[in-house]
């Protein structure tokens, strides 16, 4: 299975703000976007230095977050990054709770597309196009400028090589429906983004009815639900189940 099989993009979105002030902030950002690149960059850096801090919510891995923060501070050493890392589901819950309390804390969020789509519907994000936005391919950014892609995460099936030979391993969506795998396929118990991306792909390839029928048949395979891909990988390696649908 190639990367497009279970690929999903994680996005960084600028300017989460309370609804009451969103219009003013969006107007400010719209005015900035009209400036030449060099002048816009200078204005942003100047404004950031006055605040001296940046609050970042993300579901990014700790290793990647550290690398990104380090690179950012090499260019802007005076700006202190406050990073809150958690699962995308928990971060969305936190953001929605903050919105209800009108206590917005994050300046930037890095979350998968599904969570960002909910935030867009709740009007919790403002539009902004980065200086280098034009360099990104269309599929890696929101057409309405609510987010720009940060990186792509590929989720792929995996198997215990001591339990399944290379030739017998599943190589397609259809292979996961083989009756011999019933009760032996592990999956994270909150695979929302995997489901959305996979369903879109199958709809484009096979049509809506066939895509939905596939998901129903996969659900009937008596999945082994576990929380967390790291745990699934460890348990699969230990032989608790032979397959992982999206590791």
Image: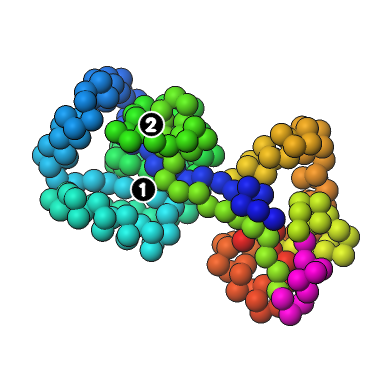
- Of badges 2 and 1, nearer the viewer stands 2
Q: Kindly tell me whether residue 157 is visible in this rendering.
A: yes
Magenta segment's dominant SS is loop
Q: Is residue 163 magenta?
A: yes
Image quadrant in which you'd find residue 70: bottom left
**Residue linked to disc 2:** 134
Magenta span: 161-170
* Residue 132 appears left or right of 75: right
Vertical position of residue 104 compared to residue 123: above or below: below
* Residue 134 appears left or right of 192: left
**Residue linked to disc 1:** 57
Q: Residue at x 19, y 46 (%)?
A: 53
Q: Residue at x 79, y 36 (%)?
A: 206
Q: Position of residue 197 (x, y in %)?
A: 63, 42
Residue with the most extreme right position: 179
Q: Position of residue 80 (x, y in %)?
A: 19, 52
Q: CA distance from mark 2 to mark 1?
A: 25 Å
* Residue 166 appears left or right of 120: right
């Amino acid at each position: 299975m190639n990367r497009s099989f279970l690929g999903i993009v994680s996005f960084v979105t600028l300017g989460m703000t309370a609804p009451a002030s969103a219009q003013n902030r969006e107007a400010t950002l719209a005015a900035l976007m009209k400036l030449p690149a060099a002048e816009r960059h200078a204005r942003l850096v100047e404004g950031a230095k006055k605040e001296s801090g940046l609050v970042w919510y993300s579901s990014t891995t700790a290793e990647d977050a550290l690398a990104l923060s380090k690179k950012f501070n090499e260019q802007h050493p005076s700006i202190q990054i406050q990073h809150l890392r958690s699962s995308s589901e928990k971060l969305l819950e936190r953001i929605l709770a903050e919105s209800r309390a009108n206590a917005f804390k994050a300046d930037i969020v890095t979350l998968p597309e599904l969570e960002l789509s909910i935030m867009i519907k709740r009007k919790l994000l403002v539009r902004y196009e980065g200086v280098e936005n034009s360099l990104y391919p269309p599929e890696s950014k929101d057409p309405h400028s609510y987010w720009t892609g940060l990186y792509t995460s590929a989720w792929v099936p995996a198997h215990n090589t001591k339990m399944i030979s290379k030739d017998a391993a599943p190589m397609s969506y259809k292979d996961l429906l083989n009756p011999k795998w019933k009760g032996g396929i592990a999956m994270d118990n909150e695979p929302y983004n995997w489901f959305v991306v996979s369903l879109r792909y199958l709809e484009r390839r096979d049509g809506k009815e066939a895509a939905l029928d596939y998901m129903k048949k996969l659900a009937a395979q008596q999945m082994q639900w576990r929380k967390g891909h790291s745990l699934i990988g460890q348990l699969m390696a230990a032989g608790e189940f032979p397959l992982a649908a999206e590791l």
